[in-house]
Image (cartoon, rainbow, N blue to C red):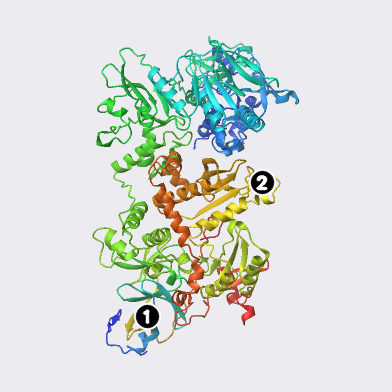
Amino acid sequence: MDTSPREDSPDELAPPTTGPVDGVIGELTEPKHPGPATETPGTYRAGMGASRHLVVVGGGMVAHRLVEALRDRDDAGTWRVTLYAEEPRAPYDRVALTSYFSGRDASDLALGTPDLWDDPLVHLVRDTRVTEIDRAARTVTTVRNGGSGPTAVEPYDALVLATGSYAAVPPIEGSDLPGVFVYRTIDDVAALRGWVEEAAARWKRPVRGAVVGGGLLGLEAAGALQALGAQSTVIQFGPRLMPLQVDEGGGEALRRLINGKGVAVRLNTSTTRMRPGRDGKVRRMDFADGGRLDADVVVLATGVRPRDELARAAGLDVGERGGVVVDAGCRTADPHVYAAGEVACIDGAVHGIVAPGYAMAEVVVDRLLGGQAVFPGADTATKLKLSGVDVASFGDAFATTEGALELVHADPVAGIYTKLVLSDDAKTLLGGVLVGDASAYASLRPMLGRALDGDPGAYLLPEGAGSAGRPATTLPDDATVCSCNNVTAATVRGAVTEHGCTDLAAVKACTKAGTSCGSCLPLVKKLVTTELESAGITVSKALCEHFDLSRAQLFDVVRVTGLTTFSEILTKHGRDGLPQGARGCDICKPVVASILGSLDTGHVLEGETATLQDTNDHVMANLQKDGSYSVVPRIPGGEVTPEGLMVIGQVAKDYGLYTKITGGQRIDMFGARLEQLPEIWGRLVDAGFESGHAYGKSLRTVKSCVGSTWCRFGVQDSVALAVELELRYRGLRSPHKFKLGVSGCARECAEARGKDVGVIATDKGWNVYVGGNGGFTPRHAQLLAEDLDTQTLVRTIDRFLMYYIRTADRLQRTAPWVEEVEGGLEGVRAVVMDDSLGIAADLDAAMARHVDLYQDEWKATLEDPEKLRRFASFINAPTTPDPSLAYVAERGQVRPATPEERLASSDGSGPVLVAGTTLEVRR
Amino acid sequence: MTTTTTTPSSTTPSVPVVLGTSSDAVGWTTVCHVADLVPERGAAALVDGQQVALFRLADGTVRAVQQLDPFSGAHVMSRGIVGSRGDAPTVASPMYKQVFDLRTGRCLEAVGREPVDLRTWPVRVEGGLVMVAVPVTPSAPVAAVAVTVVDPADDEVTP
């Protein structure tokens, strides 16, 4: 790695060291203040820290991207960065703000990895404003919010203004009334949420909401109000919704769609004033046409204005409609001051969306590191993030290019309006508007400015319109696939061809494509598959050398044919041309065992099925490193009686087992020998315990907090629900283990969102989250549905689990499955909540069958002498313990002896080993 | 009655007997009835003071390999999944899933480790009895090998 200083860099901001400097640049590189920039090059070479100081004013998405990119690229550590964020939190995903209403908490909106803020070269100062820039002295003055703290003066070598915008408040009488909100920050949204919830509680009727502004943000705000249970009306001054993005036809289709979602729309309406009720809070809106509307809450979404006041005060140029004027390198007239994001006025325009801001951040970083990058032009493509309303717009959506042709497909019945804008020869894609079905967005957008293959009209056909459907696009290498992270098709392809990635997850990790908003993931997936195929790498879903089928295909085969033995399944559906005597392997056998288990075809140890089980399932215990096993009785919901605890304690004591509380709220007993398992389980079953399936690819536990029965804060009985769910899904075989959690209130003490299915109580019922896990790649579960009653909740989880069991790959947990399955989380929601595949009844029936047929595997085994034979330690000495087992005492319990301890014991120099665990009371 | 032998000799009587010279003396120890063995599963046996893993294959053949899993140091080979790789009947270690040819003990899949083969024993089935060939002079027990520790995978202990 090049760690040499960049003093030979052509960058005007190079440290004042060697090399020719002249004119204005020379003057400006003269340090005029004490501080890091005066450190000598010698200090810098000695690696005692970054020599230059970058101050970023603003803590939004662009500021975050800038710091992330700088730390990514500045290998030599030439810059240290101080970020001043006005909000009391680290930068967050403002674009996803609306999702804050879907029950997500603020931390879910965090951008990137938290490690960035631990970087010694990055200093994030929250809750602090920059009040003044002294360009001559190259310092900024800062003050803590609330004005309590003293002001501070901080020198800089380079300054980036990334102050963003503020929500414009139109000059309408009453816009300062309580109950009138803007929609910009987490605090705005939280205040709005609090207001609506309080109003709903007070009025005991649906809260009447109104949104002034029918643009992108206004529609999102309307959706958010609706998500809060409020009625919502959008008031649009102009003749159509989203006027900046869609044309007249698209606007009309959009209005219908929005209406269809239950949001009222008033077009061509000018609000003249908002009037308070007797309580002083907003109550009514008056319109210029004489109309009026009752409203308990109003959101103003009439646009944003750049926060350019610091720049103005510092004497920097601002554009006609605001915004700090910068050149193509994002630099102001002052070579030490840059601007990026919504505050910048570049090519005479201010851009209120994030993609151009990210591009500017990258340009600034390149310039700081001595590069010559220029702003590539604004990518103004937008996609509305409103559930059930698909709108996308990109490129020259209004066909303003000379000679441009418009190709329109409108289906008012289906609520679809799609339009492509093409060059005058009808070949090159110039832009498009997609309303009602934006599924072509991901593949069309990167084709902007390029010739489309085949008949352009075919791109407007609905997705999956058979062989005559959309042509497959061949993306040029330089086409941007992921605009959030600026990843090109070539980079994605290179991840496959050069870095050996063979699946979507690996490509995401390698390229960062699709890791921000995720809208490009379908395209990335398609690219990866195509590339793997053309590279001759077969994306084989084949299980192993015995089956060409994937697990999901095999599941369908077994389900439909009703076959119940491995031999039949292998003979009829195994790979062609298997050698005589091919008998499956350690891959396909457990898969078939799991499938048969999921279909509840009988006991796991019944007949031939017993031969398919891995050792854990075969002896219904967990193999440990020395060949002994651990035993875990089920403790549903983590609820256990003192008598139950005493039984477990006595069993562990009698057999000398090491005991430990698991993460799943139950008790694990270690060191049981194979031949002891039936005896141990005999005692546990007698005491009313049953198998905990800690050994199975199946439900492990349903973790719960204590809930409303005891807890002062609980709003629902989480333990009762956890017990119900655990008893419902116990023994359900699945592609991988899965866990559930139930929390009795939003404090989430059960850590339910770290589970495959997490349930969190609300005042109105339950929110259900899916796809979480701990382990190597921790994942937070994502919201699937809100405020369900218990019956609907159970049905939803039934379907989710069964859909997962039927379609997941071998050893694929729910998080990667949700990502890979058709349509992602939305697709899962459609299947589970809206029965989009028409399989819900079938899934319900399958779960009902599981619940009906459940039996405790251990109890059934103890009743069957044939099954008990497999627990002999030796076939010719069935009760002789494995003579190799040896234990040492530690903290009052046993543990397996290490190889060193065994050696030391055998030559008499070490501790005396305990030869196996013993049953004292029965001797 | 079917007689299956896996040694060159097919005329050996069904009781332990010394074959050959004293330097390579081999005896046959009767271990169990073939019916005691579950087809396509293993069972451990104590043979001549050593732990042996017996496997009854689908075609009736019985194979014997060392019970000690050389990769984990635990005596568990009999608890692995029986299957096939190409023509080779195999067992996969239940511990870290290395795969071995049951005919030769050869390690076919080392799962990223240095391959280590298993010791095998000749086995014959006669009169419904399973017999394992043992040297007349007992050999030293197989030495234990270092144990590999796997990362704790999750919050519930399930290696």
Question: Please, what is the three-letter code of the amino acid marked with disc 1?
Answer: Ala
> Which residue, given by chain and number where applicable, does mark 1 sit on?
B35
**Left or right side of B51 for A180:** right
| Residue at image point 62% right, 45% down | A748
What is the spatial separation of the Cα atoms under label 1 and label 2, in whole angstroms? 59 Å
Mark 1: secondary structure: helix
Evaluate whether residue A283 shows in this view.
yes
Relative height, residue A158 to residue A583 (above, below): above
- Where residue A344 appears, as percent x and y from the top left, is 53, 18
Nearest to viewer (mark 1 / mark 2): 2
Q: Nearer the viewer, residue A44 or A72?
A: A72
Q: Quadrant of residue B25?
A: bottom left
- Where residue A596 appears, as percent x and y from the top left, is 39, 61
Relative height, residue A440 to residue A346 (above, below): below
Which label number is shown at residue A489?
Answer: none
- Where residue A702 appears, as percent x and y from the top left, is 56, 54
- The subunit letter for the residue under badge 1 reads B
> Which residue, given by chain and number where applicable, does mark 2 sit on?
A714
- Count neighbours of disc 1 (C-alpha within 10 A) and say few if under 14, some if 14 to 19, many if 20 or more: few
- The subunit letter for the residue under badge 2 reads A
Question: Please, what is the three-letter code of the amino acid marked with disc 2?
Answer: Gly
Q: Are marks 1 and 2 on the same chain?
A: no
State the quadrant of the C terminus of chain A: bottom right
Q: Nearer the viewer, residue A760 or A369?
A: A760
